Amino acid sequence: PEQAPGMKGEVPPAGSERRRYHRIPANLGLLVRILDPQAGEPEPRETTSTINVSPGDAFFNSALGDRLRIGTDLALHIELPVDTPNLFAAKHLEVTGRTVRLCAPHPEDASMRGVAVRFLSTPRFTNDLG
């Protein structure tokens, strides 16, 4: 079995991984929009990029700060690395997700923090950026 990083020669027991899918490193453009913001607030959104993705979740850095909490629902538009002259080729994946983990703010930039999101819907191809 493959050794998990930081395990110092130990192989984690089968079934100990909490993720459903293996994530792959991927720096993809990402538009994040908070669904159902507080009453009277404008809809918070940002453009960032993924750090890694899987068929069921994603991890990225965010500057949305304290507007994100565990359980916050998000609309995600992930830019696909499509290089085709076909005008009708899908350029994005659109998916709804829920925040499942928030990392401590980055030491170099306290406004940025890592965010793990589990997808609530099946990603769908789209040309619309949301």
Image: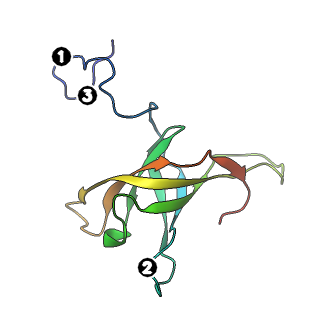
Q: Is residue 129 above or below residue 22?
A: below
C-beta proximity under 8 Å, tags 3 and 1: no
Residue 97 is situated, as x and y percent measured from the top left of the image, at: 50, 53
> Which tag is nearer the camera, tag 1 or tag 2?
2
Q: Quadrant of residue 63?
A: bottom left
Q: Toward the viewer: 75 or 111?
A: 75
Residue 122 is situated, as x and y percent measured from the top left of the image, at: 62, 44
Please name the residue shown 41% across and 62% down the image: 72
Residue 71 is situated, as x and y percent measured from the top left of the image, at: 39, 58
Please name the residue shown 18% across and 16% down the image: 9
What kind of element bears circle 3? Answer: loop
What kind of element bears circle 2? Answer: loop
Q: Which residue is mark 1?
A: 9
Q: Which residue is mark 2?
A: 38
Q: Toward the viewer: 7 or 109?
A: 7
In this view, the residue farthest toward the left is: 8
Q: Which residue is mark 3?
A: 5
- Amino acid bearing label 2: Gln
Residue 53 is situated, as x and y percent measured from the top left of the image, at: 48, 42
